[in-house]
Amino acid sequence: MSGQILLLSGPNLDLLGQRSPEIYGTATLADHVRAFEAVVATHGYTVHAVQSNSEAVLIETLHAARTSAVAIAFNPGALTHGSWALRDALEIFTGPKIEIHLSNPAAREPFRHLSTVAGAVSGSIAGFGGLSYVLAAQAIVALLNA
Ligand code: DQA
């Protein structure tokens, strides 16, 4: 199989490695992208990794994915808990879509318990630290090859 998978990261994830390491670990976003890429590459897929702190850029990137990507893996950061626009943008993409979180938002502060995007994705993987990215890559490949 072949095709490009969009690995999209939202606000503040550019600071992984420095940001609250007791919650998010010491690995950087580049480390997670590499781990994700290593899994999908063995199945013939490429990765287009984009991180933005801007909701508008994230929405535009999701729109562009309609013609460039076969699947989307997305960690929306804190926008998970409040962006209905991101949910709408995800709904437009018809291929497999996975929501990723390093931490388990359901076990954290109440404001993190709502995910606006959860209803617009194929499934969510949360709470496994860096392993969340590896599991998401495996899940995307399984959905693409199903
Ligand atoms: C996060 C969880 C969010 O609640 C938080 O705002 C983040 C990171 C995670 O990967 O665990 O920025 O998406």
Image (tube, helix red, strand yellow):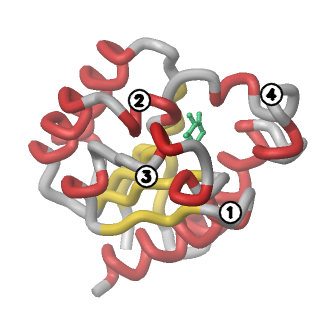
Query: In the image, which disc is placed on residue 19?
Result: 4
**Quarter the N terminus occupies:** bottom left
* Residue, disc 2: 79
- The tag earlier along the polypeptide, 2 or 3, is 3
73 up-or-down from 62: above or below: below
8 up-or-down from 37: above or below: above
Residue 131: give x, y in percent of width and height. Answer: 71, 66
Q: In 3D space, how far apart are the residues under numbered discs 4 and 3 (Cα atoms)?
A: 21 Å
Q: In 3D space, how far apart are the residues under numbered discs 2 and 3 (Cα atoms)?
A: 15 Å
In the rendered structure, which amino acid carries the disc numbered 3? Ala
Looking at the image, which residue is at 53% across and 75% down?
138
Q: Secondary structure at mark 4?
A: loop
Q: Secondary structure at mark 1?
A: helix
* Residue, disc 3: 73
Q: In 3D space, how far apart are the residues under numbered discs 4 and 2 (Cα atoms)?
A: 17 Å
- The tag earlier along the polypeptide, 4 or 2, is 4
Question: How many other residues sit within 10 Å of disc 1, few (<14), some (14-19) or many (≥20)?
Answer: some
Query: Image quarter for residue 65?
Result: top left
In the rendered structure, which amino acid carries the disc numbered 2? Leu
* Residue, disc 1: 38
Q: In 3D space, how far apart are the residues under numbered discs 4 and 1 (Cα atoms)?
A: 24 Å
Question: How many other residues sit within 10 Å of disc 3, few (<14), some (14-19) or many (≥20)?
Answer: many
Task: Say which of marks 4 and 3 sits in front.
Answer: 4
75 up-or-down from 128: above or below: above
